[in-house]
Each structure stands twice: as structure tokens, then as C-alpha cells.
Image (tube, grey):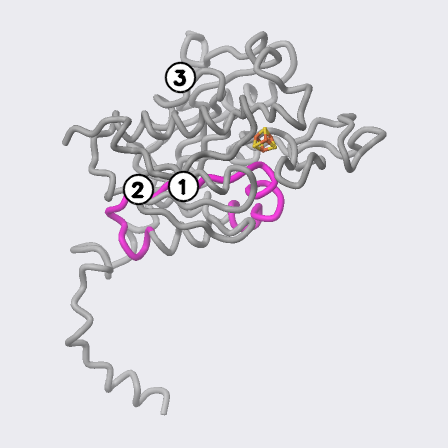
Amino acid sequence: MTISLTDTQTQAQPTWCPGCGDFRILLGIKKALVAMGKPLHASCIISGIGCSGKLNHYVNTYGFESLHGRTQPVMTGVHLANHKLNVVAVGGDGDGYGIGLGHLMHTMRRNMNMMYIVHDNQIYGLTTGQYSPTTRQGTKTASSPFGSLETPVNPVKLALASDGISFIARGFAGDVDHLYKLIQAGMEHEGFALIDVLQPCTTFNKINTYDFYKERVYKLEEDASFDKTNKDLAMKRSEEWGERIPIGIFYQANLPLYEASLPAIQDKALVEHDINNINITGLYKEFI
Ligand code: SF4
């Protein structure tokens, strides 16, 4: 089926600040959906709370705006109800690596066939610029006027340490062509895919700007010495941050899917089961 970028639009207009990296992640997701060529009703985008939380209002797929830090349980529920859907969750670094981190760890190790895109701008943008889990140490923000004291979360390293997850990547919102191909690869991958996206917040983060990243990012796939199937190599590259920052697929493997162990959904999706003729008398008796 052929779909176009125009088909992916809704009537809602983005309310993000001018130049925000969210616009480019939105475009990356739309381009990936077009490149995949699946009908738009075959995808569902789940969002959390934060500036990125509105993203699913702007894409003409199914959507669900969930609670802060709760995209993972919601996407798991959607996927188990209909594992034939292309289920994608989006959230910010506060949503995913702060309040939602407990859920994320367990979703990663289950390796269900879904994708999570994190808009990682190293700040809480919606609440006007407090330091977040990925803010670099020493950064002055509204809540750390003398500089953040905490060691930041390293999302790629954290995911690599979580046995079970089979696709871990990092993108940059300033390179949409590269980003959409990563997103498409994550959508087409059989298993859980995490894509951490370096996303400038033009209003509250004056350090991690487009220029900051443009001077530093390099693509792992252009480095002949890198092998995305080698977890040890990926772990080493995940520690690289400074003059050079790697983007691309850090790790990809063919690992068992959680849903492959669920007998009830082997023949058809849960939503396709006939629930009108189920006899639950025996079950009743067990509990009465
Ligand atoms: Fe984007 Fe930052 Fe504005 Fe939020 S506050 S919309 S992240 S630029």
C-alpha cells in the first residue's frame, strides 16, 4: 500500500516552541511510516507526559496519551491485545528514564515486538527547565542554579545492561534522514527497540544545541571497526561522550520474543477471539 506524508497529517497543529527538536522527531516518525508502507490504521502511537506527549495528536494513526512515566505498561497492554499492530511509544528523558524507569527496565528485558522513542533533551522542558535524569553534571538549570550534582543516566548503557532487549540505537533530531531510517529499522525489527534521540530544547537547554551535536556526532555504521552484533563493543561505544558522540544502531540481535511463549495468541490476536461463546461456568465454580 502506498501512503504519503500528507496522509499522516491530522488537523491538529503542533504547539512546540520554534526550532524544537520534537518537530524533527515527528517528521522522522512520519517518514518511517511512509517508508514502511503499512496502512496507518496498522500503527498505534502511545505517548507520556511532557512536551513530546502531544506527538500522537499530530500523526494519523491510532493513539493513546497515557500518564507520566506509564507508556510502557500501556504499550504492553495494547500489544498483547493486538500484537499485529505496529506499537510505538514516545516520551521524554524525564518520562522514560525518571518516573518511568522501573517500567522501562522490565519492558526491555521481555523483548516484545514494540518500539520506544525517547526525546532526550536533557531537561524538563514542559515544566520550564529543571534538570532531568540525563542532564550532564554541572549544568545550571532552574532547579540546579549552582550546577547539577548528579551523575547522569546513560540510556544506551542502561539498555545494553538489560539482557533481553534486542535493538538499541541513538539518533539525532538534526539529521532526519538518518533518524527516520533508524526508526524504520526499529519498527521492522522483531523485538523491543529503544531509540534514544538527541533532541535540542531550544528554549531551556542552551548547551546541547543543534550546533553542539553537529560538531560531535558520527555514525557507527560508517566505522568499519564497529560491529552492532558485538555487545562488548557496543558497551564501549556507549561510554563515548564529549568530542565525539556516536549515533546509529549500537546493538541488534535475534532474541526470543515474549509473545512467542503465549499460547493464547499464537493463532490469532487476542482481539480476534470470539468472546461471545465462552463458557466460564467452571471458572465461576472455582471461586464460589
Ligand atoms: Fe521543545 Fe523545549 Fe519548547 Fe518543550 S520547552 S517545546 S522541548 S523547545
- Residue 178, numbered circle: 3
Q: In which quarter of the image is the N terminus?
A: top left
Quarter of the figure with residue 270: bottom left
Q: Nearer the viewer, mark 2 or mark 3?
A: 2
Q: Position of residue 196 (x, y in %)?
A: 50, 30
The residue that appears at 33% across and 45% down in the rendered structure is 44
Inspect the magenta stretch and tell me whether residue 81 lies in it: yes
Q: Nearer the viewer, residue 14 or 99?
A: 14
Do the numbered discs 1 and 3 sit on residues whose CB atoms are within 8 Å? no
- Residue at the limit of the structure toward the right, as seen here: 146
| Circle 1 residues within 10 Å: few <14, some 14–19, many ≥20 | many
Q: Which of marks 1 and 3 is in front?
A: 1
- Mark 2 and mark 3: span between their CA atoms? 22 Å
Q: How many labels does the image show?
A: 3
Do the numbered discs 2 and 1 sit on residues whose CB atoms are within 8 Å? yes
| Circle 3 residues within 10 Å: few <14, some 14–19, many ≥20 | some
- Specify the amino acid type for callout 1: Asn
Q: First in sequence: mark 2 or mark 3?
A: 2
Residue 63 lies left or right of residue 199; in this view the side is left
- State which region is magenta: 79-105
Q: Name the residue under label 1.
A: 56
Q: Nearer the viewer, residue 162 or 117?
A: 117
Q: First in sequence: mark 2 or mark 1?
A: 1
Q: Name the residue under label 2.
A: 61
Q: Quadrant of the C terminus?
A: bottom left
- Residue 89, numbered circle: none
